[in-house]
Amino acid sequence: MSKLLLFATTPTSGVNHRFAVLSAVKHFADHFGYSVCMSWGVTRGVSYCRFEELFAPVPGVRIVNVSPEQVTEYERCARSGRDMIVEGLPFRVFRPGEPPSGNLFSWDLAGCFALTKLVPGRRSHLVARPSATIRMDASAYARAHHIDKRLGIRVRVEEYLSRNRKPHRVTQELNEVLKSIIRLPWHTKTFIATDSEYIQLMLASHFPDTRYLPKRFDLQESTGRYVHRQDKEAMFTFLKEVYCLCLCREIINVGGFLNDNWVRHKIIHEPYGQALP
């Protein structure tokens, strides 16, 4: 039987975070001959969605949906360094600096990126393929609205002020982003993907020929309304937006989105007007 590498991520980690960790683990496993099993926490970070509700199978990776309680137990083992038994098999918690041997358990970014450092060469990023249902719906929308002829605009607004990613849910930061984008001509055909109702309304008022997927902005804050992170329908909508963004002819990417590494050649930077044809 081949060696197994089991890993899990924090309850708050989103889909982008999880696939970054998965890419790191797979890079290590392919080099050292490990089989990979991902414990997918059905937690608030992914709106309590099971893996198969969101994504197609990942070749060479077994995905097991686990409860928030199981994720908490994994974290306890990782912090204490205590070995564990999962599905009748023993796993040793990997500690950075130790040589890999036997069945291993790796916890979140620190453990998985430490594993990657043991492998020579550059790490590649796995493509996260949405589920067949999500791809079918997004593809139909993209064809109907000629998304491949549009400029994609992605603005992800960070809810935690302690994180470096901007913009935060702060009016001045939101307006700075808007100011940089609305320098583009009003007649630019656009596709908007954002979790901020204010950003969506302001961009749509500047670009009359714009498209965006309908969504609920259910979270009220002082600077406007936002998509609620625990809204399952919003998670499905986000993956449709990701599919459409990757089809756009060019992309303004503020805050990042899933699979943006695979469309780097389409991403334009400030001043945006000079980058457009």
Image: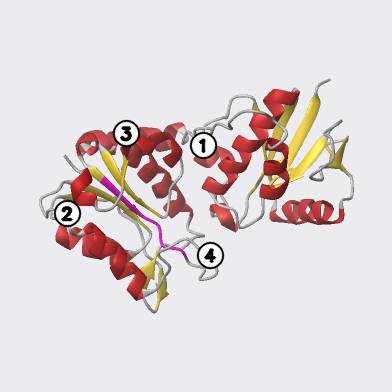
Label 1 with label 2: CB-CB less than 8 Å: no
Question: Does residue 62 appear in the picture of this structure?
Answer: no
Question: Measured from the top left, where is residue 167 in percent x and y?
Answer: 40, 64
Q: Hey, which quadrant is residue 245 in on the image?
A: top left
Quickly name the residue at label 2: 184
Q: Hey, which quadrant is residue 262 in on the image?
A: top left
> In the visual, does 233 lie left or right of 99?
left
Crowdedness of circle 1 by 10 Å Cα count: few (<14), some, many (20+)? Answer: some
The stretch drawn in magenta includes residue 154: yes
From this view, report whether residue 102 is shown above or below residue 272.
Answer: above
Name the outermost residue toward the bottom. 222
Label 3 with label 1: CB-CB less than 8 Å: no
- Label 1 sits on a secondary structure element that is loop
Identify the residue at horizontal 33%, vertical 74% (top origin): 172
Query: Amino acid type of disc 4?
Result: Arg
Label 2 with label 3: CB-CB less than 8 Å: no
Quickly name the residue at label 4: 163
Disc nearest the viewer among 3 and 4: 4
Q: Which mark is residue 139?
A: 3
Label 1 or label 2, whichever comes before in sequence order: 1
* Distance Cα–Cα, label 1 vs label 2: 35 Å
Identify the residue at horizontal 46%, vertical 44% (top origin): 258
Give the extent of the magenta segment.
Answer: 152-158
Label 4 with label 1: CB-CB less than 8 Å: no
Query: Amino acid type of disc 1?
Result: Phe
Disc nearest the viewer among 4 and 1: 4
Quickly name the residue at label 1: 55
From this view, report whether residue 13 is shown above or below residue 21.
Answer: below
